[in-house]
Amino acid sequence: MAKGLLVEDDYMLNPGYLKLELMLKGVRVDRSLFEKGLIREGLPREGILGNLDLILPEETWVNVSFQEERARSSPYLLLERAGRVYITNGKRDVEVRLVPRPAFYDKRTSTGIPLYNIGVVHGNYIAISPVKRCEFFKYQVECKYCSQEDEDGRDLSLYSIDEVLETVEAAYEEGKAHIVYITMGFVSSPDGGIGILRPYIEAIKKNFSILISLEALPPKRNEWIDEAYACGIDSVIYNLEVFDPELFKRFCPGRAELIGRDRYLEALEYAASVFPKGTVASHLIVGLEPRESTLKGIDYLTDIGVVPILPIFKPIRGSQLEGMEPPSTDEVAPIYAYLYRTLKRKRISMRWVKDMSIVTTPIEGRFFTEDRKKGSPFVTISNPRLRAKAAWGLATIRRRLRVRQRGDE
Amino acid sequence: MAVVIDRRPLWIIILTKGFRPLFFIILTILFWYMMTSTPPQGLTKEGLRAMAIFSVTLLLWVSHALPLAITSIFAMIAVPLAGVLDTREAYSLFGNEAVFFILGAFILAAAVMHSGLSSRIAFRILERFGRTPGRLLLTIFLLAAFLSFFMSEHAVAAMLFPIALEIAKALDLKPARSNYGKLLFLSLAWGCIIGGVATFLGGARVPLASGILKELTGEGIDFLGYTIAVIPTVAVMLFVGFYTLKRIFPIDVESTEEATMVLSRKNRNMGKMGYGEYITGLTLLITVLMWIWMGKRLGLANIALGSVVVLFLFRVVRWKDVEEYVNWGIILMYGGAITLGTALERSGAVEWMVKSSLGHMTIGAWSLIALLSLLSLLLTEGMSNAAVIAVLMPLAVGLAKEFQVDLKAVTYAIAVPAGLAFSLPMATPANAIVVSSGYLKVKDMIKAGVLVSLSAWVVFNFMARVYWPFIGIGAG
């Protein structure tokens, strides 16, 4: 018991552990925070989109559930004392900061759509899905952990370019987003959806000095990865999700049958040769496969220059894995430590995947290692907007140098 | 897909891209230095400036740092601005007969291709004669050569290329590995190259050489006279080229039945010969006959442009169709090349260059022809054919005058080898087109091309020495 208490103390003192704990267990919110208007009721959406973003010590961002069922039994309470906000486990308090709800959430597009329907801010990026489509549902091979409402593969919603631009502009002007994170599900066309997304990407690049990440499924041919880079995407995320081949087939039947594990790995390797170092990433969900298999996946992906991002499996209501237990903090912490050490040893940049609230980032893996006390290794420009501009400028110069039209050869 | 990502290390890309501005800075300094220097003894100030423009133009043509046509425009504006020729005279040279002959020839070729006549001829001949692997190759080789007698070799290569690709696919040839694949595409390219030097129509080289010669000396070259002088060389080179190809890449297929089936199908799909094809074919035939028999009297350009007017009268071609096929860049380039050549001659720069380099030497006529043809043959592998002519012609005319060599002989010694670029893809569009098929590699082209280039030089000089005196082209 004493050991258990000590561990809990460690969790509170170490932002890495605390982030994991909060992500897994959620937080109860003291009524006074609502009464004082420090927290408003969440967005009328479920899952991470209706959660709270907090900043823990050492600038560690975390997205915490406070409305879901599991949060009600969380050992952690968010409370306010003398104008300051703390997280307490009843024994120790840790001061945190609330990320204010973006003001643009209260706005609507000129066509009347609430902006939070189009884009949601997490950390330093705004996530947008201009087209909500995943044809895995159409072929009934959707991923087992997914609970998307799209059950017949039709477009659930298609926001116009102007609507997306209005949302990005609002977030950009408010200083809430330095990266636009565009997501898209499976489309059976050979381009992996680039054809559909290109007008959006080009419009965003034309109007804002902002970086764009794309989370999608790999296209059938590598030429489309070239196109993706050329049209303005600065980072790609092709999520393998599960490294073990058999479990990959079991949990992600659509990805296995319609794309194939080999194509995933091939596309990731090729993308890593096209995009800047550290900007190609792939999710491996911790908790869906044995620890050794995740570690093998980390080794393989880092060997080909890809940054593994390790979200923790959390059963989603309505998904086929609703009843499966998530892993514990003690199980996942060593995996993050391994990820951090591997990336550091192989000199793969961890800069791109940082300040993310919904996953433990690779750089936050240091909290579980001997580098715990070293602080963030990044030397950056202190002004966030200037930093974002500089990153955008460098990315633009690199693209200009690397992209050639075929006729130029 | 329209883009390619350069995946080399960034520092290499930056160095490569940095080379271009550095090149232009150095070029500007060189140009400024030459323009402002005191001319050496015997060279006028205008002569030195003409040489400065010539040097910059030469470097730009060789390096391809700017498109050829834009380099020519630079020459065209630099000549009057530097005071070498007055503006009116410089631009009037653009109106040279050769430029308009080339324009007319392009439009005629465009009509032939647009009407479908050239494709019909190709399919008919290939289906009729290409029944065995060897005969199919020979047919492609000779067909490419024959068509290049009447059309630009580049256009012929572009026209026959898809047909060769279909044959290769029908025969299931393995790209880069099948000997027959290599033979197929090299036969196509070399047929075009060798056939392209046979007449004024195979490329714009000969008209350009003729145009520069006329501007510099007042003498011209006639259509029939040129072909009579060159055709034996072409005939021998067709034999040498085909024999060399078959020796280097032995045929490795036994049947071409599948290819014949494809060609038969294509032939059937062409349907009956239409009105446009009849009119175009007849017009082309009459035009060629007029060039041969009335070229001197009526003027080659007048006949060419007259035929163009006839084609439009019969509505067999529209201006929109012509615009797709005519290479306006080449027209601009030729105008600039003639202006530059004239500027070098009139400013005294050519005379000075000849006297200060070879003036103290005694060179025999045939040695000069051998030297010029070798120079032209070597340069054409790395430079545009037309640029080789633009660069060498003024110098050759100066040397011919100095050593009293037949002007026609030195013109042929440059114009013919300038078209015989066998070894490298960048040497001529026909080579570039066939390499793009993937069925042969650059090293295959070099391996066979070097041997044939050497043969071409020997054959050309042998014919010059033995045959030309019989037709009145001699040592002076």
Image (cartoon, coloured by chain):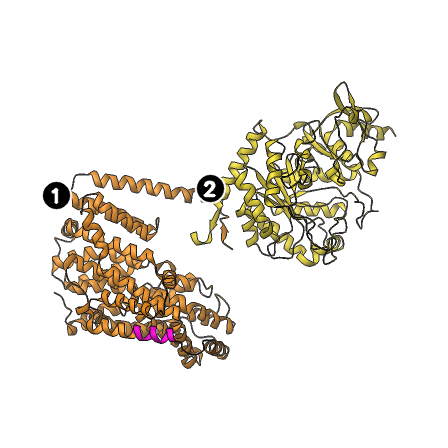
Chain colours: A yellow, B orange
Q: Which residues are magenta?
A: B273-284
The answer to whether residue A179 is seen in the rendering is yes
The chain holding disc 1 is: B
Image coordinates for residue B68, horizontal then vertical, percent: 32, 53
Which residue is the site of mark 2?
B11
The answer to whether residue A347 is seen in the rendering is no
Image coordinates for residue A396, horizontal then vertical, percent: 51, 40
The numbered mark, 1 or 2, whose residue comes first in the sequence reads 2
Nearer-the-camera pick, B96 or B166: B96
Side of A330 where B160 appears, left or right: left
SS at circle 2: helix
**B190 up-or-down from B7: above or below:** below
Q: Residue at left 22%, top 65%?
A: B412
Image coordinates for residue A236, horizontal then vertical, percent: 61, 45
**A147 up-or-down from A74: above or below:** below
Side of B460 where A248 appears, left or right: right
Which residue is the site of mark 1?
B41
Q: Give the amino acid at mark 1.
A: Gln
SS at circle 1: loop
Confirm whether the magenta stretch covers residue B290.
Answer: no
Side of A186 where A37 appears, left or right: right
**B458 up-or-down from A37: above or below:** below
Task: State the CA–CA distance, disc 1 to disc 2.
Answer: 47 Å
Question: Which of the labelled discs sits on residue B147, or is there none?
Answer: none
Side of B438 where A270 appears, left or right: right
